[in-house]
Structure formats: C-alpha cells, structure tokens
C-alpha cells in the first residue's frame, strides 16, 4: 500500500539548499561538553591515539608573539593576559584521511583501536578560538568562520621539528588568564592514568611512568565471562605505576580555582579511627593567600594498576549496532584497567594533603585520583579520559566503554550500545572483586604478626568496596551485581574480631552473647563496615548467633565464672520467654542439647587453677532475696550448692523452674556450720540467725534450737557456753554471773535458745541498796523483770529510797526528775544517770522509771509560778522553757483564762519591760496607733501564738474608739483608715455602724484649720477634673492614699458623684445647682441622671416627675431684627411642661411658645418616661384641597406601597402607630388623589405653652403632599400636580407618611423614607436593601408584629387584680425580684454581681427545672444576611424552632380588656387550634403583674398559641416579648403537685434577658 502524501505536486519541482549556521551548530555541540580542561582532554587523547610519547602545552602572550622569541618578560602569572594556546605532540603526522576527517563534523575514526568515535572531539577547540591552526606532516591548515560558515584553507609549511602542532588564538570573550597550573597538573596527572602511549606532558612539570607488569593467577571460581558471553577476561597483570609532578614556585603561587572539602588546621588522623576513610568534608575554598616561594613543588604517587586482556565475541546484531553508533567495528581485544589505592598509598597522599598550607595535594580533591569527601567515592569511569560518571567504589575503571556524545558519561540508553556497556560493566565488577580478594588475602597473612595494622587495612578495603550511589545509579548497580555474582562458589572474606573470615562464619555483634562467646568470630561493626554488610547478597549474609554456636562453645572450653553466669542468665531468659515459667513441653531437642553440653567453669574464689565446677553436680542455690542476702561470698556452703556470686544476679523463681535447683534453707546451712566445719565462726552464724529469726516459722526455730542446744556457741564473759549456761548483762547486778559479751544479738532469739534474762526480785531486794547497783542498772533489771513482778512488788519499789540523785542522796522515785538540760536553771532534783543529756542504753529503761513516778518535766502550774518569780534568772529560764515546750507539753491544758490574774507575759517598750496577763497585750504594734499595748519584742510570733496572745483588739473595741475619739486631722485620719483597711476585719453590721459615724475630717472652706467631721458616704475620693469643676462647690472631696480610700469605699464613699448623688442635690435646690454649674454642665449632669434613671426607686421617680429639675429650651426672636436672627433660652420646669421636638417643622413654627427637651435620644427617652409628650401630639393638621384632579394615582399608589414596605422592614415596632398598612393593598383603605393646591392648617394645643402671641399658635401653609383620614378610618394621600409632569415632592410625601405611621418620630425618618421613595430598586439594592426578599416575603414585618394600640398614661392605667392561681407565687416572687433590683446598685454605683447571682439562685429554686432544648448560642444569622440593609450584621438567639405567626386579635376581644386592651394574640400556622380561654385569662393576669413589676408597657408583651410545641416558651424581637400560651398550659397541669413558680420565673428570665441587656434579635 502506497504511503499517503500531504498533497499532489504538479508541474516542475523546484529544489533548494538547506542553510546551516555552522557557528550555531558548533556552539550547540560544545554546550553539551564539560567546560573545564575540555580542550586539553580531547587533544591529549588524540595524541595518545597517534602513538605520541610526549605532549607540550604552551601558553603565549601578545607581547611574546610580537617580540623576538624568548624575549618577553613574565612578571606575574596570575594577571598575565594570554593571546594563544599551543599544544604539540610527537605522534604520527596527519594522514590524508586524518585531514579529511578533521574537516568533517561527526565523521569519527573508523579504527577500532582508537578511542574517538563521534568525530566531534577536535571541535572542542572552538570553545576558546574561532580560527584554530593545525600543522602536521609539512602541511598547515587554518579553519575559520566566514558569514557563520566554516571554511578551511591549507598549504605547505616547513618546521624544524616533526611534531603535530595545534595553535589556538583565543577569543576576546574567552578567559585570557593562564589556567591554574596546580589545577591543570591535577587534571593531567589523572588523565595519564590509563593512557597507553603518552608518558610525558610538559607544562613546566613532568609526566608519569609505568613499571614492569606482573601476571596474576585468577582464583578458581571467578567467572571471567560476562553474562551474555560478549567479553572474556583472558589474563590479568598487576602494573606498579608512579606519577611524579613538578610545579615551579612561580606557577604554584597562582593557587587553585577548585574548592577543598577539608577544614583548615585539622591534623591528619588515622583513617580507621575517623568516621570515613576518604577525607574531611568542608565547603571552604582554597582561595587563601599563598606565600611567595621560588622553589618548585614535587608530588609523587605510587599505586597499582590492574590490566586485564579482554577478548570480545559480540553477536552480529550487537556488532552492527555498535558500528552504526561509533562508525567503526567493535575491537576484537582491548585492555580493561583498574586503579586502586591501598591504605598506605592513601595515607601518604593524605599526609601531603594535610601538610599543605592552602592548596590540596595534587592527587586529592576535585578531578584528583583520590577523594577527600567523607561520604562519597569519587573514582571515575575512564573512556581514554575521565568522565563525570563515578564507579560507586574507590576503584578507577578504564576500558572501551561507549560514551555519550558529550563524553561526560557512558551510554546506557541506546539499545545495542547499552548492552555493550552493561556487559563491559560486568568485567568492571569482576576486576573489583579480584582486587578485593587479593587485598583481603594480604590482610589475612598480616593479621598474625600485625593485627592492628591488618585490621586497619581490612576495614579500609571494606570501606573502599562499599558501593555508593553514582550519577547514573545503573552503573553502580551493575558493578555491584557483578562484584558479588562473579564468584558464586567462593566465600566472601570480611574483617572480624578474630581476623579475616568467611562472612558466613562471622556473626553479628550481640551484647547478650559478647560476655561468654569468645571463639566465634564477630563482625567488626564500625561505620566503615556498615555499608558493605548491608549490601551483601543472601548467600554472603552475616547471620545472627545460633544455639548450635553456643553448644559448640560450651563443649570446646572451660568457662570462667563470669562467663558461665552470663550464659546461665541468657539461658534462663530464653527459656522463660519461649516456654514460660514451667518448662514441661516444647523445645525438647534444644533442652537435650543443653543438658548434654559440657557446662564447666572455674569459680572466682577457687583454691587452685584445677578447681572446676560442673553445673550437673549442683542441686541447691542461695536465694539472695531472702535470708541468703546475709550470706557472704566467703561464708562456707555445702558442696552441692552453687557459689553465691553465681546466682546473685539471677531470678530465684527462674533458677528453680529452669535449672531445677532448690533453695538452700537456713536450717541446712546451720546444720552444715555446726556439724561439718572445723572451728566455725559462731558469731557470724548468730549475726545471720538474729536477722532472720523473727521471720522463721516455729518448726524451723525448733530445729535450729535442737541443733545448737548442746553446742558451745554463746560467747560470754567466761568463754563459749551452751545457751542455757549464759545470762543477759542486766541479770548481773552484783558482777558474779557469765553474761553474754555482745549486746547486738536478738535478745528474743537468745532467750528462746535458753539464755537467762534475770534473777527473781526476791533474790535482789534483800541486797538493796548496794553500792554497785546504780539507778541505771536497776532500771535495766526492772525493764526485764517488770512483767513478773506483782503489784505489791512495784508499790514496795516506789516506796523504797534506793534511787541516787545528782546531790548524792537517795530518794524515792516520785521525788526525782529525769535528766534534762534545764535542770540547773530551774533547780530541779534530778536522778543520777550515766549521761545527763543523752541517756545510754534503751530508752525503755528510763521509761520504766518514768512509769514508776519519775518526772520528765515540771507541771504547768509549777513552770508558770517560776515564770512569775521575782528572781530574774529563774523567771527568764522558766518563761523560756514554757515557750519552748508549750506545743509539746502544755498546749492541751493551757488556757489563758486560768491565769488571768498571774502576770507572767512580758510587754511594754524596749527598756521598760513589765509583766502582764495574756489578755492585756496584743502582738501587732500597729494598734498602738489607736492606743493599744503590744507584746514585748523578745517574744516571737510563734511563741505568741502558743501563749494564745491575740494579734489585735476586738472589733467592738475599735468601733468604740472611733465613736468616742475619732481622728481630728487629715494625717491622723489617713493613718487610721489605712490601718483599718488592712487590718479592720469588720463584719457587715460593724461596717454599717462605722458608715454612720462622723469620722472623716473635711475642710469647711473657711479658716485654714477649720474642719468638720462627716460620714464616709457623704464624701468623694477623686478630685474632679476641669470639666466637672463645679462639683467642687457642690460635693465634699477628700484626697487620701489608696489604702485609706479603699476603707472609705467599704464604708460607702464613692470615687466621684454618680447620678444618685447628683439627683439628690438637684432635688434639694435645682436653681442653685444651675447657678453654680451653668446650663452646659447642668445638662451634662442631667444626662448622667437620664442614663441611670432606670435603676431609681419608684419613690424617687415620683419626686422627679413633680420637681422642676428638667431643662427646657425655647426660641426667642428679636422683633426688630432679621428673621434669621434668633436666640435660645432655657428654663427649669417639670417634665410634663416640656415637649419632645419630634417634628422639626412644627418646632420651627411653634418653637417660641414651647419648651423642648435637649435634642438627644437619651433625653428623649428620659423626658418621655418622666411625663413629657411629643410635640407632634399637640399639633393638629387640617387639610384643605382645592381643584381636585381626575388624574389616576394607581402607579404612584403602587410605588408608595412598595417603598413603604421596604422602609418599615427595619423600623422598630414599638414606635409604630395603630395604622394597619397591611390593609392598604385594598384601594378602599388607601388611595392616591391629585389636586392643584393643598393647604394645611397647623394648630398648637398645649396648656403649658409659654406666654406670647397666641394668635400665632395657628398657622396656615401650602404643602405639596398630605394625608387625610376619613371617618371610616381609611387614608387618602393628596399630591399636588402642577401639570408639568414632574415627580412628586417626595419630602412632603415622606413627612405626611411618617406622621401617620409613627407615634414617636425621629428626625431622620422623613429623610430616610424620602431616599427610599426617590431611589430606584437597583439603587436600593446597591445600598444594601434586600429588595427581592422583602417583596417576596408573604408575611411582612408588620403582619408578624402589628403595631400596638396607643397607651393611656401610666398613672391612669386600669389595674385589675392578678389571677387567683398566680397570687401565691407572686407574693414570693415579688419580694425576690424587688430584693434583686434593690441590691443591684450599691453605694459607689457599682454592680455587685455576687449578690445578684445569689438572689437569682434563690429565685430559680422557686421553680422546677425547665430545660427546654433551647440553644442559647449567639451566632450570625446567615439567612438574614440577605434580608435588608440592617439585617446583615444582626446576631440573634436561635432556639432552633420556627415561629411563623399570624395575627389573631387583641386580648380585649377574648378576655374582656383584662390587660389594658393591649396584649395581642397570635396563632402559629393556619391549622392551629383555638387557644383555651381559661388558661389565656390566667396567663394574662400573670403577665400584667410582671409588666407592673418591670415597668413595662403593655404593648411589649404578646401572647401566641403553638399547641404542637409546648416546650417552646417564647422569643423576643425588636424589644417585644412573645410568650407561648401552650407552654403555660402544660406547666399549669402541675399546679396541685408543686407551687406555680416555674412559669413566672421563666417569663421573668425572658424579661431580664430582654431589658437588662442590650436588645438582640431572636
């Protein structure tokens, strides 16, 4: 099938030439080449291919070229500017084919023996020159650009030397300075490593040389053939190679551009002791200062190159692919060479490297033969010259790899080329394994003579052959795979703690086995070996210990005791872990091997070197947790018992269950001591026995006693005695009995053995008194014989005067005191005792005498009598003793009232000490300020507390001082008040009493020294600022410090006058107040009263309504002046004589004849609450229409209705009049008419109008719009039409509508409505009104909450008594709520939240729990964010219930006007049941009483019926409360089972939430 073409060509076909930009093409090829030393790499490789032995590199300057040869002077190689590079070699001259290839890009050398393959290497010279010159074989050729095309011109040329020369005149943009000779030398020393022919490169330094090759015998088992049998290693030779480099001093001073990774100043350390063998890592550059030197620098490196002869046998397909890729046939044989550096070679280079001041070694660092980095092997793959590809190990590899075009890496992507390189990498792994095996063989041979050095070399070798990542991970991976798989049948040698061993014979280190496994080689686990061990294939893996290893170790040698303990510990742990505590089944084969193993060890405390213990002979062990803890290692044990150190670290339970040994009992040990030992240590035996005796059981005690009964084992004053022949020391009162010598033994134990404690009392008393029988000895005897003495014996003893005192006389025991330090000062008779201050022997000895009557301290009455003594020293000692031992001896019986007539307490001033009773003095010195005395300074606070001395006088005494002797001046008052603030501690009643005392001195304002005393609540603590300077003339201000002021605050003083105080002064004399304050400040103070008047009592509010304290303003116009020239006057009147200017037009007309309230909302509310009426209420409007027009007003009517609905949506319902605009949708209720002229007569009707021209109280004026109300209650909007088709005057329309819609108007109502009427719907939407939602809502706001009816004045409201069922609850709740609101405001104007919470808790206890399911969380109403301009930021209290209500009617339709004709009823939904009338009547009575309690208007309470949700109590909106009658009915069911308090308090809580906090939507 023919291939389809993109189109059919007809006629003559024209051909053209494809233009190639040679310059750009060459630049793109060069862009892929490595930058550094690229030219030298390619040209040196070309020289090696041309069989050259020597290469010269020459750098020439411009001065050198223009001057005679050799006459140019070189001063500084660092800054010299170069003009030309020249490279010469003595190889074969160019042939004709060479000249042809050099002028053809990508025409490689077809000779398979040559490295070049792609024909682009020479063109690297274009990176530094644009016109290279080649001179070879008598021919000179110059290659140059002309119009971006490469051209060649050539001709004959005669030279003195038959060398091939490359001349490169440098580009202007090329680096014109000489390359750093140090870096170039390092590059060349690396480059010559694997060159075949070149052995001398001259750039002011020498080249390299090779020694004679030595053939290597290949080990048996190495596979010399690659996996696909493409390559076969036929032989391998080891060639010793040495590189010498000489750099002149001038060249050395230039330095290096490369960066070193080593740290300055750090000395070389042994590579085995370092974390890595490959140098120190650092990011520091070698760009340091080089000191001037003239001497040359010599570098030398000797190493071994392994050269393998490789024969090839590629399959035809591979051979063809290689020829296509390289333009030559694959070679039949070639060399594969590898260079590796032993530890000694590395250390030599490292030593030179570390001695360099700034530069590295020429052989180490970037592009060097050796790496200086810790974590990387930087050995390279060479393809003639080095590539950027690393081998992953510390071995350089060079062979006939096929590189990529840029020669930076080998090609592992192209099909046949990839297979060629992969097969060749196998040979690399083979060579690496061969080098590793030879190196480990050397280490193995050196281990016996030099183990430390051999270990270092072995670890270095393992580190060197640990494969790391390379730029191409496939390279290191293929080399590693070949490294391990080329010897499948040979062991893999590694370094262990016992030398070089097969990896399968080496075990991983394990702390558990290290203490007893000594013959099995263990891996030398250091950082150098971790990498190789982790990469070993499974057939070379280092394994863990096996049980067979341990059994072999047990059979092969005798363990030391510590080793056998470690082994036994491990064995027990293994058995418990695998088979549990009871080893009865499982692991039979393992346990059989354990039992058959020869378990021998030499004990630590052995008698000879041949003393060996077999574990199979052991039957018992000493439990170190029991009585065996007292056995020492040197104590004798039975022969079948394991030594104590062996089992001291073993779990006894595990020893019994795993090893089957029994615990050695103390009875067995006593039997061994008493029967089988010559000259036993009985003292040691008794020490152990007494420690265990209390815990021994009766059979064990009886057995031990029987074993020792006839043995002389008790050491006495007469030698070793049997137990029944010995006595305790206290029995020897007269010195003639064999008593035991040691008092450290358990007396109970010795007594059970048969040792006697005492002789009978009848045999003792006949020898008393006796000169050798001291009170102490007698006390010891009595302590032992007390239990066998009769009562008569003890009475007889108490009456005997046989106890010696310190006065050397004999006394009865009741007349003496026990030894104590205070005896001398108190002059008490003391018993004679060996050590007066520290009684020896058991404290029980002295206690026996105390029980007989010996006193330990003087009684309370004795010590207080001594403390009140006239003898000064005794009095001080007695008082000190009393204070010291009050808590421990006398606290329970001490009562200051018992000693109210004994003066023993020191008091008074420092040098005027006197004694007083405990109730005459106080501890605090502060009360001296008020005339009270203080305890003497020598008595501490703790001692005063012991004596029960009070800190301060009682509060009643302090109040008495304040009443009788109040402070007379400022300083005294401040100090007193400050003290009382800190230390007062008064009760509420006492504070109330102090608050009524005249204790605050205040300057009278007359003479400088004249003061008067006032009560605290009559003064104020903060000095008024300039804005309230008039308060200084009206109130008392005092300036005390902070502490004194705080005390006065507690007594009722306030920081500054609040509205209560201001109101009190206002009511006393408002005219004087106005005279001192002036109108502006008077208005400021009246504003405070307006803000806080809600909290005033009803009585105070009544006084305010009848007092002329309200400031009113009226306009005054000068009749002779212009119309605009008018002034404002003010006067004080009662609130009902002042009007609220809610209609600006009416105020403009009648402002001269009425007093109006200040124009602030706070004053509007305040004056209205006090009885002021709106000005609009007293101004009547009469409309006169002339020339009615027939023009239809339906469009205007529709426009007005839509805009009014939008306007009213966000208005407060409490201001709305009783006009039902929901009926306006019917034309008969609201219509629009037009006329030519409209006149409105406005008349002021106010009985308290000011005197003036009453004829002006009626005004007739023209208007452009007005509303007329018909007798039927319908409304007509009249609009003047001038016939010019202009729009209506929206302002007059707005004024007329607002007058009709609101009972309480605001100044901005008309302007707001005018804006809405005048704006389009789009404009309203842009201004934030949610027009769509408001118009689409079927129930507008006034349908849900219809406007309430007008209210009569509060004092004329009809009052019906509350319902009977509510009366009981109301009596209790009324008192609580009044108490609650009465306590809200305390003196100082602060709200006491603690009392409020307490009162509310009491109120809540009156009602049962009413959980509701109400969610009180305040959150943002996302839905209402769409509902109008002002609803977007409204937060509300969501109850998660729907409250969609419909209007039902006012309550007077249902309950006969029981609630002032004001409560309104709603039904939820269209299908709701009718509300029950009985409950409705009861609920109405409750709400009426609550409204009266909270001073609420009736229109603020609404009732709705929602019978399907009785738990819904209600909600609030726009300061109106809606309450569910169904909820009340449900709660009312329990009226007979509990008081009816819950519903009322639930409602009260709703009231409090609504009116005591700021309003919020719900």
Image: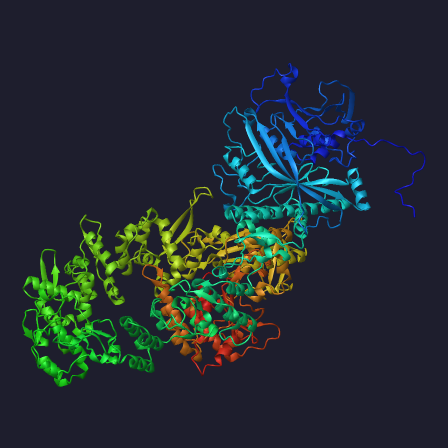
Front-most of residues 1523 and 934: 934
Percent coordinates x, y for residue 1484 in the rendering: 48, 74
Whether residue 263 is visible here, answered yes or no, is yes
Vertical side of 714 occupied by 560: above or below: above
Q: Quadrant of residue 40?
A: top right
Q: Quadrant of residue 686?
A: bottom left
- Depth check, front residue: 333 or 610: 610
* Spot occupied by residue 54 in the image (x, y as percentages of width and height): 67, 27
Q: Is residue 121 left or right of residue 999?
A: right
Colour convention of the picture? rainbow
Residue 574 position, x and y percent, is: 51, 68
The answer to whether residue 1264 shows anywhere in this view is no
Count the numbered circles shown: 0
Using residue 1326 as the reference point, say whether residue 897 is left or right of it: left
Q: Is residue 232 above or below residue 1258?
A: above
Farthest-out residue, top: 68
Question: Front-most of 1342 and 1026?
Answer: 1026
Where in the figure is residue 1135, as x and y percent of width and height? 39, 59
Q: Nearer the viewer, residue 1436 or 904?
A: 904
């Amino acid at each position: 099938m023919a291939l389809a073409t993109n189109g059919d060509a007809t006629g003559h076909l024209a051909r053209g030439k494809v233009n190639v930009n040679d310059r750009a093409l060459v630049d793109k090829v060069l862009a892929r080449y490595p930058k550094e030393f690229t030219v030298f790499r390619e040209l040196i490789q070309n020289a090696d291919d041309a069989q050259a032995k020597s290469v010269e590199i020459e750098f020439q300057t411009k001065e050198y070229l223009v001057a005679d040869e050799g006459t140019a002077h070189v001063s500084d190689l660092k800054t010299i500017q170069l003009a030309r590079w020249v490279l010469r070699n003595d190889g074969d001259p160019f042939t004709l084919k060479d000249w042809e290839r050099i002028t053809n890009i990508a025409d490689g050398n077809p000779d398979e023996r040559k490295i070049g393959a792609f024909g682009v290497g020479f063109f690297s010279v274009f990176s530094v020159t644009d016109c290279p010159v080649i001179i070879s074989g008598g021919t000179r050729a110059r290659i140059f650009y002309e119009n971006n095309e490469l051209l060649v011109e050539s001709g004959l040329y005669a030279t003195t030397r038959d060398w091939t020369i490359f001349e490169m005149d440098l580009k202007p943009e090329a680096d014109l300075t000489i390359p750093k000779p140090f870096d170039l030398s390092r590059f060349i020393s690396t480059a010559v490593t694997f060159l075949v022919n070149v052995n001398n490169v001259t750039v002011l330094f020498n080249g390299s040389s090779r020694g004679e090759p030595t053939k290597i015998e290949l080990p048996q088992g190495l596979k010399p053939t690659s996996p696909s049998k493409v390559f076969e290693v036929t032989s391998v030779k080891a060639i010793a190679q040495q590189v010498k480099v000489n750099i002149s001093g001038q060249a050395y001073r230039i330095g290096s551009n490369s960066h070193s990774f080593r740290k300055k100043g750090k000395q070389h350390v042994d590579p085995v002791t370092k974390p890595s063998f490959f140098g120190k890592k650092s990011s520091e550059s070698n760009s340091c200062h080089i000191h001037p030197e003239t001497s040359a620098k010599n570098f030398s490196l000797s190493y071994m190159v392994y050269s393998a002869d490789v024969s090839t046998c590629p399959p035809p397909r591979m051979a063809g692919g290689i020829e296509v890729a390289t333009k030559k046939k694959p070679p039949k044989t070639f060399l594969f060479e590898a260079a590796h550096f032993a530890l000694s070679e590395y250390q030599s280079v490292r030593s030179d490297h570390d001695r360099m001041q700034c530069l590295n070694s020429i052989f180490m660092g970037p592009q060097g033969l050796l790496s200086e980095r810790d974590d990387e092997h930087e050995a390279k793959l060479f393809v003639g010259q080095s590539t950027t590809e690393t081998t992953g190990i510390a071995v350089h590899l060079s062979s006939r790899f096929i590189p990529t075009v840029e020669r930076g890496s080998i090609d592992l992507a192209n099909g046949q080329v990839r297979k060629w390189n992969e097969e060749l990498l196998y040979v690399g792994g083979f060579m690496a394994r061969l080098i590793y095996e030879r190196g480990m063989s050397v280490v193995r041979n050196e281990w016996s003579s030099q183990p430390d050095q051999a270990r270092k070399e072995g670890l270095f070798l393992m580190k060197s052959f640990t494969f790391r990542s390379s730029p191409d991970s496939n390279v290191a991976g293929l080399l590693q795979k070949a490294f391990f798989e080329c010897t499948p049948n040979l062991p893999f040698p590694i370094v262990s703690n016992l030398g070089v061993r097969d990896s399968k014979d080496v075990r991983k280190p394990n702390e558990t086995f290290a203490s007893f496994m000594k013959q099995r080689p263990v891996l030398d686990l250091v950082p150098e070996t971790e990498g190789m061990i982790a990469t070993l294939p499974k057939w070379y893996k280092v394994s863990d210990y096996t049980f067979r290893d341990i059994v072999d170790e047990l059979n092969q040698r005798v363990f030391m005791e510590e080793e056998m303990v470690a082994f036994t510990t491990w064995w027990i742990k293994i058995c418990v872990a695998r088979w549990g505590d009871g080893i009865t089944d499982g692991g039979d084969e393992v346990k059989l091997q354990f039992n058959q193993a020869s378990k021998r060890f030499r004990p630590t405390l052995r008698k000879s070197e041949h003393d060996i213990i077999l574990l199979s002979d052991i039957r018992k062990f000493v439990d170190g947790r029991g009585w065996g803890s007292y056995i020492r290692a040197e104590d004798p044990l039975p022969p079948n018992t394991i030594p104590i150190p062996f089992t001291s670290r073993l779990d006894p339970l595990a020893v019994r269950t795993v090893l089957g040994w029994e615990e050695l009992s103390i009875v067995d040990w006593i039997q061994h001591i008493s029967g089988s030992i010559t000259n036993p240590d009985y003292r040691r035996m008794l020490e152990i026995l007494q420690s265990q005796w209390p815990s021994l059981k009766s059979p064990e005690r009886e057995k031990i006693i029987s074993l020792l009964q006839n043995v002389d084992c008790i050491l006495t004053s007469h030698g070793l005695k049997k137990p029944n022949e010995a006595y305790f020391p206290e029995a020897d009162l007269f010195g003639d009995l064999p008593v035991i010598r040691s008092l450290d033994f358990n007396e109970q134990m010795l007594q059970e053995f048969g040792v006697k404690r005492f002789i009978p009392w009848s045999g003792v008393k006949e020898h008393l008194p006796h000169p050798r029988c001291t009170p102490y000895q007698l006390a010891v005897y009595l302590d032992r014989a007390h239990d066998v003495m009769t009562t008569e014996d003890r009475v007889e003893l108490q009456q005997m005067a046989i106890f010696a005192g310190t006065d050397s006389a004999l006394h009865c025991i009741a007349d003496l005191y026990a030894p104590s330090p205070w005896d001398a000062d108190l002059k008490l008779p003391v018993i004679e005792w060996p050590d007066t201050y520290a009684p020896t022997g058991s404290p029980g000895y002295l206690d026996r005498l105390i029980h007989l009557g010996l006193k330990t301290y003087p009684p309370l009455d004795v010590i207080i009598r001594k403390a009140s003594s006239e003898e000064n020293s005794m009095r001080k000692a007695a008082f000190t003793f009393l204070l010291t031992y009050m808590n421990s001896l006398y606290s329970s019986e001490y009562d200051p009232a018992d000693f109210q007539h004994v003066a023993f307490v020191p008091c008074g001033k420092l040098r005027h000490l006197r004694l007083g009773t405990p109730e005459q003095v106080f501890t605090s010195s502060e009360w001296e300020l008020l005339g009270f005395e203080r305890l003497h300074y020598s008595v501490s606070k703790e001692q005063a507390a012991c004596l029960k001395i009070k800190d301060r006088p009682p509060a009643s005494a302090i109040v008495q001082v304040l009443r009788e002797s109040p402070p007379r001046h400022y300083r005294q008052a401040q100090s007193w008040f400050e003290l009382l603030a800190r230390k007062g501690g008064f009760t509420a009643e006492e504070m109330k009493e102090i608050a009524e005392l005249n204790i605050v001195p205040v300057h009278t304002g007359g003479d400088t020294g004249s003061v008067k005393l006032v009560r605290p609540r009559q003064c104020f603590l903060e000095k008024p600022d300039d804005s309230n300077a008039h308060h200084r003339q009206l109130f008392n201000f005092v300036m005390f410090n902070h502490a004194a002021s705080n005390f006065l605050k507690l007594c009722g003083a306030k920081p500054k006058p609040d509205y209560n105080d201001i109101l009190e002064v206002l009511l006393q004399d408002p005219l004087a107040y106005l005279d001192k304050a002036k109108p502006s400040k008077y208005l400021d103070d009246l504003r405070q009263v307006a803000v806080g008047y809600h909290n005033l009592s009803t009585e105070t509010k009544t006084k305010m309504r009848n007092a002329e304290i309200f400031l009113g303003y009226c306009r005054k116009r000068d009749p002779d002046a212009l119309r605009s020239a008018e002034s404002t006057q003010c006067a004080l009147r009662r609130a009902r004589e002042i009007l609220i200017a809610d209609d600006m037009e009416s105020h403009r007309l009648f402002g001269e004849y009425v007093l109006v309230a200040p124009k602030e909302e706070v004053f509007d509310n305040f004056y209205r609450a006090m009885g002021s009426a709106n000005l609009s209420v007293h101004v009547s409007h009469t409309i006169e229409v002339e020339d009615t027009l027939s023009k239809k007003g339906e469009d205007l009517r529709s426009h007005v209705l839509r805009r009014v609905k939008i306007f009213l949506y966000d208005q407060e319902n409490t201001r709305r009049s009783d006009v039902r605009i929901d009926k306006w949708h019917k034309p008969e209720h609201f219509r629009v008419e037009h006329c030519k002229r409209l006149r409105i007569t406005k008349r002021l009707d106010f009985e308290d109008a000011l005197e003036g021209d009453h004829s002006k109280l009626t005004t007739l004026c023209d208007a452009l719009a007005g509303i007329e109300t018909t007798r039927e209650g319908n409304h007509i909007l009249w609009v003047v039409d001038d016939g010019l088709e202009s729009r209506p005057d929206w302002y007059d329309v707005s004024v007329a509508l607002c007058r009709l819609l609101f009972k309480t108007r605001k100044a901005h109502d008309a302007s707001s409505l005018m804006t809405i009427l005048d704006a389009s719907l789009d404009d309203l939407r842009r201004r934030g009104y949610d027009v769509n939602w408001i118009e689409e809502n079927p129930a507008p706001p006034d349908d849900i909450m219809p406007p309430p009816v007008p209210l009569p004045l509060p004092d004329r409201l009809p009052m019906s008594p509350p319902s009977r069922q509510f009366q009981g609850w109301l009596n209790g709740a009324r008192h609580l709520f009044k108490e609650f609101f009465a306590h809200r405001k305390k003196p100082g104007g602060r709200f006491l939240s603690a009392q409020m919470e307490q009162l509310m808790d009491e109120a809540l206890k009156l009602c049962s729990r009413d959980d509701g399911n109400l969610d009180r969380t305040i959150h943002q109403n996302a839905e209402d964010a769409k509902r109008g301009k002002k609803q977007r930021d409204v937060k509300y209290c969501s109850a998660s219930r729907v409250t969609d209500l419909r209007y039902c009617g006012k309550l007077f339709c249902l309950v006969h006007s029981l609630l002032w004709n004001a409560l309104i009823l709603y039904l939820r939904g269209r299908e709701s049941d009718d509300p029950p009338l009985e409950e409705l009547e009861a609920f109405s009575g409750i709400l009426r009483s609550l409204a009266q309690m909270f001073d609420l208007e009736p229109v603020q309470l609404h009732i709705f019926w929602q019978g399907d949700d009785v738990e819904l109590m209600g909600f609030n909106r726009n300061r109106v409360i809606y309450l569910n009658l169904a909820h009340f009915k449900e709660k009312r069911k329990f009226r007979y089972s509990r008081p009816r308090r819950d519903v009322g308090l639930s409602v009260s809580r709703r009231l409090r939430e609504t009116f005591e906090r700021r309003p919020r939507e719900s």
